[in-house]
Amino acid sequence: MKKMIKKFAVALFAAVLTLTAAGGSLTAEAAAKAPKKITLKVTTKKIDIKGKAAITVKSVKPSNASKAVKYKSSNKKVATVSSKGIVTGKKAGKATITVTSRKNKKVKKTVKITVKNMKPTSLNLNPSSLSLTVGDKAETKAAVKPAGVYCPIAYSSSNPSVASVDKSGKVTAKAPGTAVVTAKAKEKNSKGKYLSKTCKVTVSKKQPVYGEEFKGGLVISAAELKAKIDRKEALILVDARNIKVTADTAQGAITMSWQDISDSALSNRGKGRQNQRAKL
């Protein structure tokens, strides 16, 4: 009898754990109401062969109802549709995309799609110019019209050693100088030409982080300083001997009092040099 009770208790405990683990999804599923109406958003109803359009649920009634839907094409040879509502043109013709609520099969909407041969009419590239420092990355984005046209874009740089660009339009600044990034359409327009746009990229030298050169201490010897200058290292030189001493200040240095850059947490700040810890 005791063994039976023990087995029952273990089984009950396992069932509770299972329900607890699934509780989140069950609760979310139960909370979603069945919609009485759905409104769709369509990027375009005319697409090119290989062109794309997106169909999404714009709103539902009531507003807290489920937006989960499924898509179906009436003619997959003309246009297919993915589970996320992306329509792709296959051949010239017409197809109807039916969007049905997963919570209420009686609620549905249709979108008529026309597939035909299309040509690009314009190409824009944003931004048209970029100012970067070495190591920076930036996105450029090409947009082709009309909506739904199939027109891949090829990106290139006039000076990859200064600024390179990948196939998605991401620019990487590599060295000081200028470069021109070009976005060129891979499909010809109605006049038989390939559209293109450019973005001028200006890359400047990366500025040193303040205090970066002084990880081991603020004060360096004259010999160390000369060696750094000879190597043409990027330096921010601070002459903190005395704010009033300017006649023999090092060329290009910032002048200030050493008290101004001493550790403000010290009780004897500004009273003497002993135990002062300067920081940048």
Image: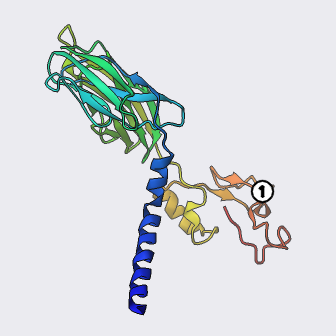
Q: Is residue 254 above or below residue 69?
A: below
Q: Nearer the viewer, residue 237 or 261?
A: 261
Q: Is residue 153 visible?
A: no
Corner quadrant of residue 164: top left
- How far from the left and from the top, in percent, is residue 118? 22, 14
Residue 45 seen in the figure: yes
- Assign a secondary structure to mark 1: loop
Q: Which three-letter amino acid code belongs to the residue tagged 1?
A: Val
Name above or below for residue 258 compared with residue 132. below
Identify which residue, 177 or 246, lies in the foreground: 177
Residue 155 % position (x, y)? 27, 31
Quadrant of the rendered image containing residue 199: top left
Q: Residues within 10 Å of mark 1 (few under 14, many from 20)?
A: few
Foreground pick, 124 / 15: 15
The type of colouring in the image is rainbow
When asked about the image quadrant of residue 73, the answer is: top left
The residue at 71%/67% (across/down) is 278
Q: Which residue is found at the position 72% from the left and 72% from the top?
A: 277
Q: Is residue 272 left or right of residue 72?
A: right
Residue farthest to the front, as pictured: 1
Q: Position of residue 181 (x, y in %)?
A: 33, 30
User: Mark 1 sits on what residue?
Assistant: 245
Q: Residue furthest top?
A: 191
Q: Residue at left 31%, top 38%? A: 165
| Quarter placement of the N terminus | bottom left
Q: Residue at x 30, y 36 (%)?
A: 159
